[in-house]
Amino acid sequence: MGNDKTNMFVAIALSLVVLLGWHYFVTGPASERQRQAVQSQTAQNTAPQSADGIPSPSPREGSPNAPVPGTVPGAAAQGPISREDALARSARVRIDTPALYGSIGLKGARIDDVSLKNYHETVSDESPRIVLLSPAGSANPYYAEFGWVGANAGPLPNGDTLWKADGDLLAPGKPLTLTWDNGQGLLFKRIVAVDDKFMFTVRDEVENSSANPVTLYPYSLVSRWGKPQTQGYYVLHEGLIGVLGSDGLQEYTYDKVGKEPAYGGAATQGKAWSNVTGGWVGITDKYWAAAAIPDQDKPFTGAFTERTDGATKIYQTSVRGDAVTVAPSASSATTQHLFAGAKEVNQINAYERDLGIKQFDLMIDWGWFWFLTKPMFRALDFFYHLLGNFGVSILLVTLILKIFFLPIANRSYVSMAKMKAVQPEMTSIRERYKDDRTKQQQAMMELYKKEKINPVAGCWPVLIQIPVFFALYKVLFITIEMRHAPFFGWIHDLAAPDPTSIMNLFGLLPFAAPDFIHLGVWPIIMGITMFIQMKMNPAPPDPVQAQVFAFMPIVFTFMLGSFPAGLVIYWAWNNTLSVIQQYIIMRRNGVKVELWDNLRGMFKRGNKSAAAKG
């Protein structure tokens, strides 16, 4: 067989290596990690100050004899109480917006009860809504806190402070005002507002009626108790994240932050960035996040920390502003924001633009190849809003990409067609110089030059497909817009594998298919299109190479069985377009299309084998 077959083999092998590596290093380990149990999580409260002003536990709360909040005093062996009971421990002000619902506890004034109205745990609208933030004392404490730290200012608001509210509802256009008097001349006022999506605005004011000036530092933090279950994919960051001024994006996994040096105390590890301007810090999951956003025009200190209390690890991101001195009979105020919600691309970009938040778009993990993933999302999102279906959008974007790369693909297929046309001459050269490989190669190169053939042209269609494949995979995997996005028929979530399985005849048999062999309808369709594409060309004369080509569609079919359905649909559609394109070009160049002969030959060999066995 000719060098065109060798080049095609190299290209397909390259694709196989990429996909096998992806499966071995990414999807395989991630699946194993997802099966691990979620680490046990207990609950505590935080206090507002450490040695350097960054909020961290006080000695009382960190002492071994202090009861753990959320447990029954004197019964340390008992676990945390239910979320409902933890919420009931404090009087609360209700949160109700088109996107969120929950409450703010008047004890501590933490934003610690937030659920998402428009997102459910599964594709069913009857499934529970996503719970994002939970109070201390529950099984999974996760909350945001705002306030002041300082020395020689008397009592300051903390997690035990009982605030007074001017209403019983926080809603868009209806802010909430909280007040607390420390009894030593300082009156603290907190005005909390929320928009119709996921952004809270928190304005902290302090009035000094004492005889002495006081110096305070504004802070905000996001605290999460216990390591959550993560997806565990290398292409996705989950954990502590932030943009710290000129230092830019900082990402720390839950395990990484614990390996940092001791910080602010013997039981605390972490890292801080001092005197930075512009940015934010938070904790991110795959689709959801909570982030504290300081004043973008004033310097602040940001920190990522992990501290341990018994068996519980507490992960925290915090910001502390510069000192604010409040003279007698004067007041001061600072405004910060909290993002708590779904990482919707357009909404994240709108917050960055409207509030001037430095690089807030990096909340979404576009990766190193953002120049591919971002345009891919933009194209898919544009056609989704035009057509109303992300699956159809994938098909249309694939077609547009095919048209865009048409000149390159045409040259590739034309070159492949020419190589097929000169197959007799190539065979003759091999026979003539079968004992002299150097002369054989020289004669081949002269033939290529004479016929204007590029021997590596066959690699280009596959090489072009690989970055598109990766960009689409990344978009399907990281963007919440793709989560639970339906196609047609049985595909109700393009970001999840095809739910059908050949093992139970696609649901006809009354049992669940095993997870280790997941092969749905769309992966089979993809395998068929790949098989047809390979049968467009003559079979390789080398038996080993022929066997590799014969098994390639089978290998890819099983491999893509666990990939997102949207990606498999793309691959099948791309194969179909490639077959049509190659067929037209081969006919135009007078080259025989081998598809029907190869199929007939395969069935004839099958009949002969059956007859021989009979």
Image (cartoon, grey):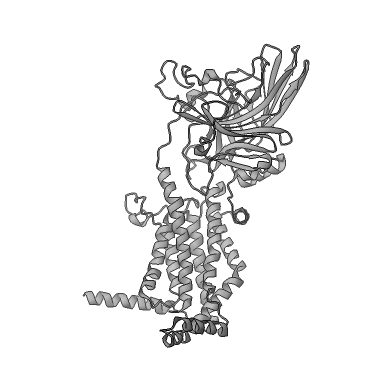
Closer-to-camera residue (198/443): 443
Provide residue 346's location: percent of width, then percent of height. 64, 47
Provide residue 568's location: percent of width, then percent of height. 47, 59
Callout count: 0
| Residue 143 seen in render | yes
Residue shown at 65%/28% (left/top)?
219
Closer-to-camera residue (588/68): 68
Closer-to-camera residue (44/455): 455
Outermost residue on the left side: it is 614
Instruction: Specify whether 446 is left or right of 321.
Output: left
Which image quarter holds the C terminus?
A: bottom left
Which image quarter holds the N terminus?
A: bottom left
Residue 159 picture quarter: top right
Residue shown at 59%/22% (left/top)?
108
Residue shown at 27%/75% (left/top)?
609
| Residue 351 seen in render | no
Q: Is residue 430 above or below residue 272?
A: below
Residue 325 picture quarter: top right
Instruction: Specify whether 607 is left or right of 428.
Output: left
Provide residue 287's location: percent of width, then percent of height. 54, 43
Provide residue 183's location: percent of width, then percent of height. 67, 11
Closer-to-camera residue (245/123): 245
Residue 186 picture quarter: top right
